[in-house]
Amino acid sequence: MKNFRNIMLIALMAVVMVSLPQESQAQERRPKAQIEKREKKEQRNRERTMRDKDFSMMYKIVKKNSFDDEKIDIIRVASIGSYFSSRQCAELLSLISFNDNRLEALEVMAPRIVDDKDFDRIMKQFSLSYKDKVAWILSRR
């Protein structure tokens, strides 16, 4: 019941987050226009990154749980309506005990990571044998 309460709290946080309007479906052919469009999208995603206050609350909830499966479930629910910075992703991964479970959590969060400047922080959370898998997951995002 305690875990259910935590998951529901994270779900409520995800629902409360305000989503921005979707960008138009029209694709412009000029490279400059495509670059500008990509930069605007990245800026919107940065703005949607989970606020520090919300992240701190989520971090504490994940940290309270003993089992990696429960932690991953909470991260999965929080990922529904949130975006993460590389720093936030690395901090959450540090709470998970085993590399296989960290990999599973990364697969959940990777499409929701808005910046790539701190991918090395994420890579440091894994042992050497997992680096190729981590790089592959991050490249697919």
Image: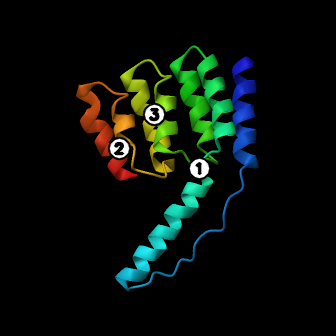
Q: Identify the amino acid type marked 2.
A: Ile
- Taking depth in this image into account, of 5 and 58 the one nearest to the observer is 58
Q: Quadrant for the N terminus, please.
A: top right
- Taking depth in this image into account, of 71 and 42 the one nearest to the observer is 42
Residue at the spot of label 1: 49
Q: CA distance from mark 2 to mark 1?
A: 20 Å
Q: Answer above or below: position of 99 versus 58.
A: above
Residue at 39% across, 36% down? 122
Instruction: Give coordinates of residue 100: x percent, y percent.
Output: 38, 25
Q: CA distance from mark 1 to mark 3?
A: 14 Å
43 sits to left or right of 139: right
Residue at the spot of label 3: 90
Residue at the spot of label 2: 137
Q: Identify the amino acid type marked 3.
A: Ala
**Label 1 crowd (10 A; few <14 / some 14-19 / many >=20):** some
Instruction: Give coordinates of residue 115: x percent, y percent.
Output: 45, 51
Q: Please, what secondary structure does the residue beneath circle 3 have?
A: helix
Of marks 3 and 2, the one in the foreground? 3
Q: Identify the amino acid type marked 1.
A: Thr
- Taking depth in this image into account, of 76 and 97 the one nearest to the observer is 97
Residue at 38% across, 85% down? 29
Instruction: Give coordinates of residue 59: x percent, y percent.
Output: 61, 28
Outermost residue, top side: 66
